[in-house]
Every structure is written in C-alpha cells, then in structure tokens.
Image: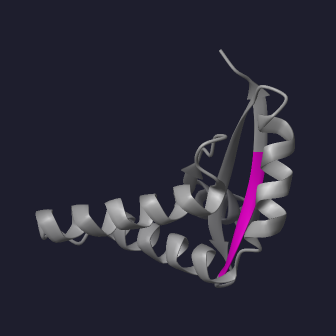
Amino acid sequence: MRVAESHYLRLRYRSMTEVELVPDLSSCIETVAKMEYQETLQSLMSSGEVGDEIKAKIEILRIFLEEANFRKLRAESEAHLTQGKRVAFVIHLEDGKAKYEMHTSPLK
C-alpha cells in the first residue's frame, strides 16, 4: 500500500502546474508576475481556448499576486541580482495557497 501511495504522489507532483518568473534589476518580481498574468489573460482571450494548463497558470498567478509579500520577495531577489546572479521564482499551488521556491544561478 505504501508503494501505491508513493507512486500516486510522484504522479501528482509531476502533473502539477508550475510557473517560473524571472525578475531582473529593471523589473521586480511583482512587475514580472503582473506582466505574466496579463499576457496569459490576453493569450486566453485572443485564442478563445481554455485549456486546463492555462486555467491553472492564471489561478496560480492570481493567488500569488493576491497573497505574496512582495517587499520580502524584492529584498530576497535584489540581494542576488545586485551580485550579478540570475533569480527565478518557481510558483505552484499547494492546498489552495501559492507556494514558491527561489533559485539562483550565475548569469551566463
């Protein structure tokens, strides 16, 4: 039974929609999130197709924009950006809440 539960969780995790946002020194995480939300809505309106992935992306971004502490996220990301690093936030929903991980890497 434990193997089946583990397999189910892996499948569920793999199918989870995630959104990656990459701020820079000219566009903070809040600005990038708003732009991505607007672009996704515009894409939805122009195509007329409402796929599950687009609906999930819109929901993730909407909740993130409503709940995130952008002052904290800006401070976290700008500390790395000013050191010349690339910053990416990977956002997903967990129990109806927006969760994120911040990843940094050297600029190429």
Report if residue 3 is visible in the image.
no
Outermost residue to the top: 108
Q: Which residues are magenta?
A: 97-102
* 92 over 68 or under it: above or below: above
Q: Quadrant of the C terminus?
A: top right
Q: In the shown orientation, is residue 91 left or right of residue 69? A: left
26 and 18: which is toward the camera? 26
Magenta stretch secondary structure, dominant: strand
Q: Quadrant of residue 80?
A: top right
- Count of marks overlaid on the render: 0
Q: Is residue 100 magenta?
A: yes
Q: Is residue 90 above or below residue 16?
A: above
Residue 6 colored in magenta in the image: no
Q: Which x, y percent locates residue 88?
A: 67, 43
In the displayed structure image, the side of residue 84 where residue 41 appears, left or right: left
Camera-side residue of 36 and 19:
36
Q: Residue at x 54, y 72 (%)?
A: 60
- Occupied quadrant, residue 19: bottom right
56 lies left or right of 89: left
**Which image quadrant: the N terminus?**
bottom right
In this view of the protein, can residue 36 be seen by the observer? yes
What is the quadrant of residue 44 in the picture? Answer: bottom left
Q: Residue furthest front?
A: 26
Residue 86: x and y in percent read: 71, 32
Is 38 on the left or on the right of 81, as rendered? left
Residue drawn where x is 30% and y is 69% of the image: 41
72, 16: nearer the viewer: 72
Measured from the top left, where is residue 59 in percent x and y? 48, 77
